[in-house]
Image (cartoon, rainbow, N blue to C red):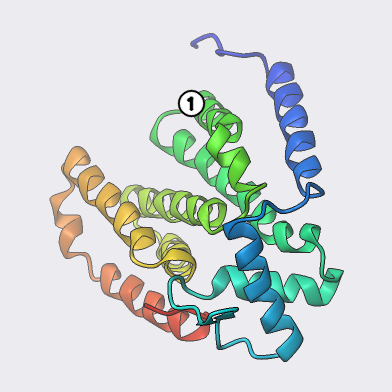
Amino acid sequence: MNKPFLPDGIYKFLFALLGLVYITGLFVPLMDNDSAHHANIALHMHLTGDYVSLVDHNGDYLDKPHLLFWLAASSYKIFGVTGFAYKLPSFLFTILGLYSTYRLGKTLYNKEVGKLSALILATAFSFILANNDVRMDAMLTAFIAFATWQLTEFIQTKKLVNVAGAALGLALGFSTKGMIAVFVPAIGAFFYILYVKDYSLFWNPKWLLLLLLFSLLLLLLPSQL
């Protein structure tokens, strides 16, 4: 058995420190740029009860899908209108993204690679910044990681539960920032199939089920092109 890169105690210590950094960031005031702009769009939703329209001070906002704003407005309703409430959904999905990264590394290689992968992502400056200057990026990264993990598991096991998981991850990602969240996991899955040389998987009817579930989920999620 190969010697672990880091002892388990070191991993726990580093993740505990990182957890402190991320949690502290929840209480840092919003930066006066896109994060504050998006928070105000969510505030309009919260104050008007209109969860369909995206409105900023210049009128309709058509640049991004709804999910970030929808979650932030829901968080305002539960926790009050604060920077903490706006950031909390992204933080929660960051945890999902780190866990998905760990599971993806474990699935493709081993547990040690999974832990290192999650640690590298958690310490990336851009990922920490995405949880302070909150836009769509932390959630987008999380959903791409989750969908890629589920697609990889499906390619290896052919299980229906992974079809459902992949459809959910792709739909959430699409509702966060559009087609990029579908394109990246799909390209990864395509080349992974080529890598494992399981070409018959291209004709597996479960892909149709994944497409159907993806489409149904989009009807239930606040998304737009």
Q: Residue at x 34, y 57 (%)?
A: 158
- Characterize the local packing of mark 1: few (<14), some (14-19) or many (20 or more) Cα atoms within 10 angstroms: many
Which x, y percent locates residue 166? 42, 62
Q: Residue at x 81, y 41 (%)?
A: 24
Circle 1 residue: 113
**Residue lying furthest top in this view?**
3
User: In the picture, which quadrant includes the C terminus?
Assistant: bottom left
Which x, y percent locates residue 136? 53, 59
In the rendered view, tell whether residue 220 sits above or below residue 208: below
Side (left or right) of 138 relative to 186: right
Which x, y percent locates residue 61? 49, 78
Given residues 83 and 143, the one toward you in this image is 83
In which quadrant of the rendered view does residue 3 lie? top right
**Residue lying furthest front in this view?**
58
In the rendered view, tell whether residue 189 sits above or below residue 73: above
In the rendered view, tell whether residue 217 sits above or below residue 132: below
Residue type indicated by callout 1? Val
Which x, y percent locates residue 224? 42, 80
Given residues 158 and 117, the one toward you in this image is 117
Q: Residue at x 56, y 40 (%)?
A: 127
In which quadrant of the rendered view does residue 32 lie? bottom right
In the rendered view, tell whether residue 135 sits above or below residue 26: below
Q: Residue at x 82, y 70 (%)?
A: 81
